Amino acid sequence: MDIQLKRGLLDVCVLTAIKNEESYGYKIIKDIRPYLEMSESTLYTILKRLENANMLTVRTAEHGGRLRKYYKITKAGLGRIEDFKDEWREVMAIYQFVMKEDLNK
């Protein structure tokens, strides 16, 4: 898969995982796991990129005697999910065109 496409897909998956409530790293990975495997290092790289793009905010709070970072989606992050949905419709139309020959065999 094209690395840029995969990167965009992973970004949207992370944003979707925190769309309805703030979350933290381990829970995000756990929520995404039924759909795709993601390492902690990949997740934290994505979270930092999304934070720098103002698509999420971060707060730190103590939990069980340790500091934990909580991530919350912003309006820009919600907008990115909606943009993705629009883009994906176009990708699906292209996919249907490309697969048309195989489906007619």
Image (cartoon, grey):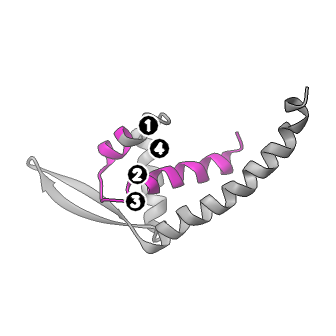
Name the residue beneath numbered marker 3.
19
Residue 17 bears which disc, if any?
2
The residue that appears at 67% across and 49% down in the rendered structure is: 5
x and y, in percent, of residue 53 in the image = 50, 69
- In the picture, the disc for residue 42 is 4
Q: CA distance from mark 3 to mark 1?
A: 20 Å
> Could you tell me the amino acid type at mark 3?
Lys
Residue drawn at (41%, 50%), measured in percent from left and top? 44
Secondary element type, mark 2: helix
* Residue at 85 percent of width and 31 percent of height: 103
Label 3 or label 1, whichever lies nearer to me, is: 3
What is the spatial separation of the Cα atoms under label 3 and label 2, in whole angstroms? 6 Å
Q: Is residue 36 magenta?
A: no
In this picture, which residue range is highlighted in magenta?
1-30
In the rendered structure, are the residues bearing label 1 and label 4 in contact, judged by CB atoms less than 8 Å apart?
Answer: yes
* Residue hosting label 1: 39
Q: Nearer the viewer, residue 32 or 54?
A: 32
Q: Secondary structure at mark 3?
A: loop
Labels 4, 3: front one: 3
User: Is 81 positioned to the left or the right of 24 in the image?
Assistant: right
Q: The residue under label 4 is which amino acid type?
A: Thr
Q: Position of residue 72 (x, y in %)?
A: 34, 63
The residue tagged with tag 4: helix, strand or loop?
helix
Kindly report the distance in space between the C-alpha atoms of the residues bearing marks 1 and 4: 5 Å
Left or right of residue 60: residue 55: right
